[in-house]
Amino acid sequence: MRFEGIVEKFPGLCVAEGVVHGLSIGGKSEDLERLRMEIVGRIRSSYTLENVKDDPGFRAYRDFFWGVGVDPTKTRPASEALVRRVLAGKSLPVINAAVDAYNLASASNGVPIAAFDDNLLCGVLTMRFARDGETFLGIGMEKRAVLKTNQVVIADEGDRIVAIYPYRDSDDTRVTSSTRDIRLVSCGVPGVSRSKVLDAYRSCADYMKRYCGGSSDDPSLYP
């Protein structure tokens, strides 16, 4: 991961990045459903809708969002959005085993995790500020959003934006049942420890290997 002007403005920001290889991605499984229920129970015993905003980790992501001009009461950091969904009595999304695994890792660890089909990426990823007039089509979006220059994005070497950090991944590089290699990025912000970011990556990679097979690289921690 390269950084352009981000670490200078947000000292303490870090990411853990690596690839999980050779996956065979299926749908629902009883084992994955048991993990889902375990994590849902853990979340409900740890938070309420009233106090989740006061958790130091979620507060750090909220502060980062305010720092880039995004209102976190309207656009939730990804991990907090999943936790709030559970606390509101809703079920977590069921997409496929790999997507479900990284959503569960994100909710369980309180750290947003970006995941891309590695074979659809071009080269090294760069975190930078969006440029005036750039657009982005994220997963689940009906039309392209025009980005603001204070928004933090991740782009590949083709200068294609593949994520708004740490909120939404691109539809172009989304993980599907035919994906075989996944690039994972565990997303840290100032106030979230490097060890927590690394633990979230390892948890996610372990879940993927458990339910989809394959092997994983040792993650790199940047910067």
Image (tube, rainbow, N blue to C red):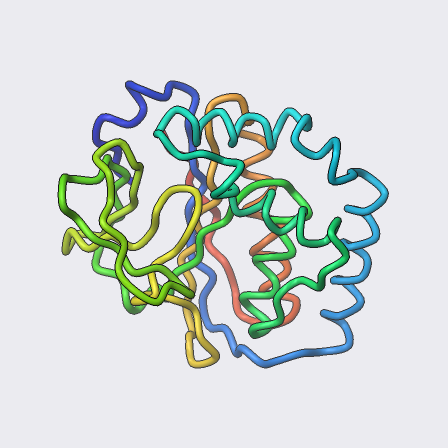
Residue at 40% across, 57% down = 183
Q: Reply above or below: 144 against 73.
A: below
Q: Depth check: 47 or 4 in front?
A: 47
User: Looking at the figure, which quarter contains the N terminus?
Assistant: top left
Using the rendered view, name the quadrant where residue 48 is placed.
top right
Residue located 58% across and 64% down the image: 208
Q: Count all numbered tags in the image, as a single digit.
A: 0
Q: Position of residue 152 (x, y in %)?
A: 31, 37
Q: Residue 177 location in percent, x, y?
A: 48, 79
Q: Is residue 88 above or below residue 68?
A: below
Query: Taking 116 as reference, is 63 above or below it?
Result: above
Residue projecting furthest to the front = 74
Q: Residue at x 50, y 73 (%)?
A: 23
Which quarter of the image is occupied by the C terminus? Answer: top left
Where does the image place residue 108, in percent across and percent down from the top left?
68, 47
Residue 96: where, in percent of width, then height? 57, 74
Looking at the image, residue 133 lies above or below residue 52? below
Q: Nearer the viewer, residue 76 or 125?
A: 76
The front one of 43 and 31 is: 43
Residue 28 falls left or right of residue 171: right
Apparent side of residue 36 relative to residue 208 in the rendered image (left or right): right
